[in-house]
Amino acid sequence: MAFKGGYTGKILEVDLTTESTRRIDTDPELARKFLGGLGLGAYYLWRYMKPGIDPLDGERNVFIFMTGPLSGTPVPAQKNAFVFKSPQHGGFSRGHQGGNWNQELKYAGWDGLIIKGKAEKPTYLFIKDDEVEFRDASNLWGRGTYATAVKITKELKDPFVRVVCIGPAGENLVKITTILTEFHRSGGRYGGGAVLGSKNLKAIAVRGTKGIKVSDLDKLMEVTDAIKAQLTGPGNAFYQTYGILYWNDWANAGFGFNYRNFQEAWVPPEKYYKVSPEFYKRELMFRKYACFACPQHCKPFGVIHTEKFRGMAMAIEYEGTANLITGCGITDFREGLAATHLADDLGLDYISCGKVVSFAKELYQRGILTKEDLGGIELEWENVDAQLELMEKIAYREGIGDILAEGCKKAAERIGKGAEKYAMIGALGGELSGSDPRTPEWDWWVDYMTGDRGSCHNAGETIETQNMRRFMDSAIVCFFVTSAGYGIIDPSYHVAAINAVTGWNLTVEEANKIGERIWNLEICFSIREGFRRKDWNYLPPRMFEVPLPSGPHKGFKLDADKAKKWLDEYYKERGWDVETGIPTEEKLRELGLDEVISEFKSLGIL
Ligand code: SF4
């Protein structure tokens, strides 16, 4: 069965050890089952990455990028997707970044890129249509992500080349790393940058000059126009005006913000204005950025005012604010932007890095970490320069930075003295995102206690949203436009767009089933690595024991018994064993995951 559209029909496999490449045909049946992006990536990761492989064993680990059926079409709003085994927690992880790289890979004629092996010396890949070059990256090793992208573009003498790369933190195998594209498009979480670092792979540049196949172009344009009209219409004005910074107001009004490592779920009103979207727009914002084919252009650029980085531009959004700025006690965007700017340049994940820094700040506040422990840093909440210094130490694994580079969970274990209480972690020991779960307005705690890639805000708060989001991550549609995420576009529009591109006749119900299959496969990957329900269902004691001291929900805390009951029902409804969290054979069979059943049986898991 050939593809009528949506797929190029081939996946590129690269072996860095032997500097060789291989073409794999994209299997139409697998495409229909796992769609692309996250889903197809998860399928190949399951097959390539046998259990027990050290995620930082560059010779044996695998890193996979996948495009989706919509990649490179005019349909708003597209992202990149990649998957790997997390070096931070050891389970499944995925990343989705904006920009244009994924679409360029499609234009180069590839549905995906599977990277095996380890380069002998620092290397970057240059994929130009069918040609693949293994290029020396010795002169890039040690450089930040901004300089790396610029140097590669100049070296290749092509301004249209698209680059993904890691920063020094990834090179130093820091576990809270990400990979970057187009300066500020970051694809957290849980250590993707370190996996590429373990392979001596600094960057991947792509240039594509081919077209894509679309089954029904007229229909595709009709759906595209309908999506665009909604994204640019009055119903979406908040995103148009403030980008994702709009969420700051929403969070501070009661949906759970992060101030000082969740010691408060809001920034007190007398301090809030300078981290509000309104202040940002009036004082700092000068333009907004859009990813490929996206009229929502939700990333607003502002100007940094600190001594270090003065006058430079930084694009900011909610998670950057809530984790690296307010979460770390900084209440002025003019300074806080320096922290997000540095994180992107070093290749650190905003969310985990923010949580690690705020954890260290709280330990300093409580006397568990001292100035001496911190190598002379006076880590006061509002001290931006001290924070920047600590972030550099983490990226280069210097002194205390070497411990913090492991993430909150392992750092707390190493520090001891009761530090565990202040590590804001959830599922698989991953850091919570930027929203305090102590709010009756939103069930963040579900995301944090069940997340497929570990604790994360974008997992989903119900089984339906979890499944549909994973479908959209496979399509690959941005979380901020689909109503399965935090946008306004009903999933039926993107399903219609996929049908127009591929010639299929998918329904929304089938899309949900595909999402469920993908979610189960991700969970099974982590189950195969030894994780069980107890490793997911965790939240810091603060969330159940300490009522909010002030703010719109003063006095509120989570109820552990209620959460346990709800989760029991969740496991039943998912078709998973309530004790262990392992999907039943019946459920796996229903989802067509027969390969998982046989492997689980051979490993004694089923
Ligand atoms: S909504 Fe924002 S993050 Fe999503 S694709 Fe559009 S510009 Fe990118």
Image (tube, grey):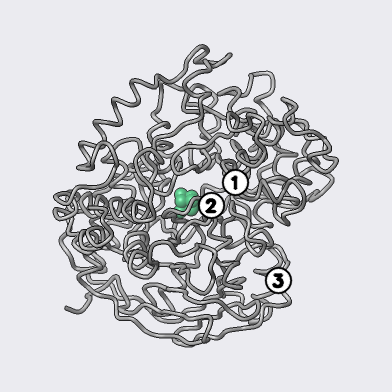
Q: Amino acid at mark 1?
A: Gly
**Quarter occupied by residue 70:** bottom left
Q: Is residue 296 visible?
A: no
Q: Position of residue 177 (x, y in %)?
A: 59, 55
Residue 170, position in %: x, y? 63, 61
Q: Picture coordinates of residue 279 (x, y %)? A: 66, 32
Q: Secondary structure at mark 1?
A: loop
Q: Residues under labels 1 and 3: Cα distance?
A: 23 Å
Q: Which residue is depicted at the point 73% across and 57% down?
A: 396
Q: Are marks 2 and 1 in contact (CB under 8 Å)?
A: yes
* Amino acid type, mark 2: Gln
Give the quadrant of residue 376.
top right
Is 70 situated above or below 261?
below
From the image, tell me which residue sits under label 2.
88
Front in this rendered view, residue 50 or 244 = 50
Q: Nearer the viewer, residue 558 or 253?
A: 558
Residue type, mark 3 in image: Trp
**Which is closer to the viewer, label 1 or label 3?**
1
Q: Quadrant of residue 121?
A: bottom right
Mark 1 vs 3: CB contact within 8 A: no
Q: Identify whether 498 is placed above or below 585.
A: below
Q: Earlier in the sequence, mark 2 or mark 1?
A: 2
Total of numbered circles in the picture? 3
Between residues 366 and 162, which one lies in front from this camera angle?
A: 366
Cα separation, mark 3 vs mark 2, equals 22 Å
